[in-house]
Image: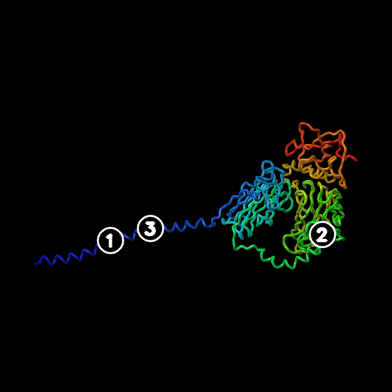
Amino acid sequence: PPTNPPTNPPTAPPTNPPTNPPTAPPTNPPTSPPTAPPTAPPTALVTPAPTSGDGAGAQEAVFDSGYGVPKCANTGSSCDSLALLNGRGTIASGNEPNLSNTNSNGNTCTDGNSGSYHSDESIDQITVTAGDIESGVPVPSGDFITEGGRAYVTVKLWCWGSGASDTADIYLTKDASSPDWEPLDSITCPGGGAQTIVQAFDVPKGTNQSIRVNFRYNGSPSTCSSGGYDDHDDLIFTVKEDPSVTPPPTPAPTQPPTPVPTPVPTPMPTDANDGPPPSPGGVASYDAGLGAPKCSFASSCDSGGLLNGRANISGGAEPNEPNTLNTCTDGPAGSYHSDESIDKIVVSKASGGDLTEGDLVTITATIWCWGSGTSDRIDFYYATDASQPAWTQIGLRQVCPGPGLQTVTAQFVLPQGALQAVRANLMYGSGTAGVNSCTSGSWDDTDDLVISVRPNPSIQGLVASPGKSKHDDVQGAIEFSAKDAEADSLMKELKELNTGGVKPAEGDDGSDGGKGKGKGKGKGKGGAGGSESTGTTALATDKYICSKHAPLASTICADGSVADDKCSSEGQRCGKKGKKCWFMSGCPAGDDGEESSE
């Protein structure tokens, strides 16, 4: 009896309670928490890092044969020409690849070929970068070059001497397929040798844009200067489109033009012969009291056809010639649009409103250049008082940029004066302007245009700054003495052309290695009447001169040597610095270089 009751009750209760609670809690907590935290944070941080530039990358330009210039075809954070622009023209040791690297859809420019690489001027590299200049330091954004954004252009140059005579004109066009160059700035070299300049700009509407750099020795701002040491290069870059950016000109022109244009062309003088059409703005009429065309107040002044032609030359007598304020007379030799003439002068400014003291204005002369144009020069002047003109030259004497109809420009700031004047003096060769600021050669043309100028009380004694000469750069005076001597020799030859009474036959002006310029025996034009010269010779002897530039025929006969081992054929190289043999046949014995009497 006592054995069974005590055994069953105590056994069941103590077994179950202690087993379940301790087993579950220690197993789960340590496993879950450490696994999740390390996995999530790295994933979130790494993903957004590359998207800060929106995928923009630096682009390297390649030569585009359609445009004739380096181009970046894809959008990016920058566009770099690399070595595609390095050098200039065909200069020694620095031939520029694919020269001249200026847009074939616009005004293709020819680089000057004077000097040598990294001794004289050259553009070596152009880069366009998205970003801005802050406190004088360029700061790239890393984003795309985008419509409506900011960008800057970096230009690497080689500057001659101290750099003080060299200037880079920087231009932008929003459409490289039809370039209309807008000036950004003109920057003088900060020093000599390798230099870098930077210019920031607002990126306009347009996906195919281009930068042009016109690097010039002296001269005036231009998209295409013609100096022997000048370099011109373009770089086309692709811009990312921004639909929110709209071109500003669209709404403006639809309303004002309708009533305005009708009365403006009406006052065009009826006695003007056919010539280049007038530009918008003021159109000049002949002022008999002044003896030259004159404009009333306007944003520009256009001579229309009042200057077209020269003197009384065949086929192109100039109306009211000579159209000068101080009795300069035009040369009577030659014929219209075969020989030299000034056909039109326009004075204009970029912004609206009447011409006003202190405005930066551009003089554009439409001219006819004889032969290849290389024998013709043009000077520009201004006078603050057209009633008593005292002429100040603007910049340096320029060479005709090519044959036939050409335009040449110069810029200056309008000084004080209510009735001012500008002058263009076109010459064959290179004459001395003299006290009246006009040359007197038989083919020379001088024309004036009088402009009305609004007063500006804040302007005090403004004058235009004349250009410098390489002789003025002391640092380069000794090193480049040979170059200056060659220039002086050429100037002497050009002066002989201007004072001579004879031209060679057209097309034989020395540009193709022909036998000399100027007083060619038996093949030149006659004096004022333009008749052929038929000089006779006796005891004929072939003579030559070893020279870089084509000498006058009379100079060869007077100072040349008889053919020998040094020079035995036309064009043969005979010395350093591009010198070659220039021959003249039929030189009479004892020729002193003067024309034979007939």
Sequence-earlier tag: 3 or 1:
1
Figure quadrant of residue 538:
top right
Which amino acid lies under the numbered mark 2 shown in the image of this protein?
Val
Mark 1 neighbour class, 10 Å CA radius: few under 14, some 14 to 19, many 20 or more: few
Check whether the beta carbons of the residues at disc 3 and disc 1 lie within 8 A of each other.
no
The residue pinned by badge 2 equals: 450
Which amino acid lies under the numbered mark 3 shown in the image of this protein?
Thr
The residue pinned by badge 1 equals: 23
Q: Position of residue 242 (x, y in %)?
A: 59, 61
For marks 3 and 2, give the one nearer the viewer.
2
Q: Position of residue 80 (x, y in %)?
A: 61, 50
Please name whichever residue, 138 or 585, is drawn nearer the observer in this view of the structure: 585
Instruction: Identify the image quadrant of the N terminus.
Output: bottom left
Is 250 displayed left or right of 144 in the figure? right
For marks 2 and 1, give the one nearer the viewer.
2
Residue 192 at least partly seen: no
Q: CA distance from mark 2 to mark 1?
A: 110 Å
The residue pinned by badge 3 equals: 35
Looking at this view, name the residue that lies furthest to the right: 598
Q: CA distance from mark 3 to mark 2?
A: 89 Å
Residue occupying image coordinates x 68% and y 66%: 252
Please name whichever residue, 366 or 218, is drawn nearer the observer in this view of the structure: 366
Instruction: Identify the image quadrant of the C terminus.
Output: top right
Figure quadrant of residue 359:
bottom right
What is the secondary structure assignment of the residue under circle 3? helix
Sequence-earlier tag: 2 or 1:
1
